[in-house]
Amino acid sequence: MLRSLLARFSIDPYLLLLIGTVILALLLPARGAAQGIAEMAVTLAVGLLFFLYGARLSASAVWAGIAHWRLQSLVLASTFVLFPLLGLAVYFLAGAWVPHDIAIGLLYLCLLPSTVQSSIAFTSIARGNVPAALCSASVSNLLGVVLTPILVAWLLPASGGGFSMGAIEDIALQILLPFLAGQALRRWIGGWILRHRTLTSIADRGSILLVVYAAFSAGVVAGVWSSLSVPDFVIVLLLSTLMLAIVIAITTALSRALGFSTEDEIAIVFCGSKKSMASGIPMATILFAGHAVGLIVLPLMLFHQIQLFVCATLARRYAKRPQA
């Protein structure tokens, strides 16, 4: 009955789960030891997700994703060219309306690499080109370790520079290692996983819910959500939504104009429109030492939540298309 009611009013049940997760994090955020448990749960969920991807994907599909240079080039151009140009425009536009550190934060989020876990999870939910998305998101994060500090030093020279090699270790331990383990065991468990696609589907959606809960909990515990006045909050929310909408529209239009398949378009849109909070917050503590880091990362935290909700809805719409 509940499923029929939701379908009648075109309400996405997964979107309701996301909203419920946010409310849970606001009312019962993970604090102290519970916060560590939540972070560990996210790490384990991400590791399981990429282990399943590794066991499910053939080596030829992975190499095809790596060799898809047109797709990879478009994603990188969106991440490190289109977004920074938008960020500069927003930085100068918002400078007269919001505190300077928040304006810096709006530009900073545009200089970050793409997310890995959620980009690939949403591509999988939407039935897109998962191998290409995996390669795009991973390469984006590896390049971001170097490119983001360079762009910050170039566009915001007063902020200082530097980066943490921990980002490379996180990618290796949380993503590449489980994926390679899945590839190694694919001969024995790959067929079983392909016959039980529900397992991967639960891992996709469950990991997103864990990321949302952990992110909102961290924001509540740190008090960052109370650092903005209502007008500042509305301005940042509108600008973040506008930037995301522009990038999604441009990447979608370019994908179709350049003749990419729907599966490739999905990977391009999801990998090219996201920004990584997992990489962005640790980098910010080093790149903006001496600044109000809490205010600088606020736009990133807001953008992160917006992109999860928007992309969850978009992924479900893509997934409803007829099977090829």
Image: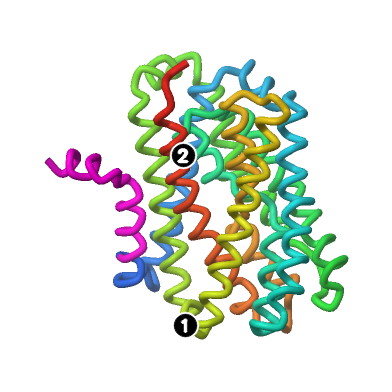
**Residue 143 relative to residue 9: left or right:** right
Instruction: Give x and y (percent) for residue 33.
Output: 38, 68
Q: Does residue 291 show up magenta in the picture?
A: no
The residue under the point 41% across, 38% down is: 316
For mark 1, give the secondary structure: helix
Residue 19 is covered by the magenta coloring = yes
Chain part drawn in magenta:
1-23
Q: Secondary structure at mark 2?
A: helix
- At label 2, the amino acid type is Ala
The one of 282 and 151 positioned closer to us in this rendering: 151
Query: Looking at the picture, how far across and down is residue 321, in whole percent?
Result: 43, 27
Residue plotted at (50% across, 21% down): 185
Labels in figure, total: 2
Badge 1 amino acid: Ser
Q: Nearer the viewer, residue 151 or 239?
A: 239
Residue under the point 64% across and 65% down: 282
Front of the two marks 2 and 1:
2
- The image quadrant where one finds the N terminus is top left
Say which residue appears at 64% left-offset and 41% top-offset.
137
- In this rendering, the answer to whether 231 lies above or below 320 is below
Q: Which mark is residue 47?
A: none
Relative to 27, 74 lies left or right: right
Q: Residue 322's x, y, as percent?
A: 42, 21
Alpha carbon distance from label 2 to label 1 = 31 Å
Residue pointed to by mark 1? 226
The residue that label 2 is drawn on is 315
205 w.r.t. 180: above or below = below
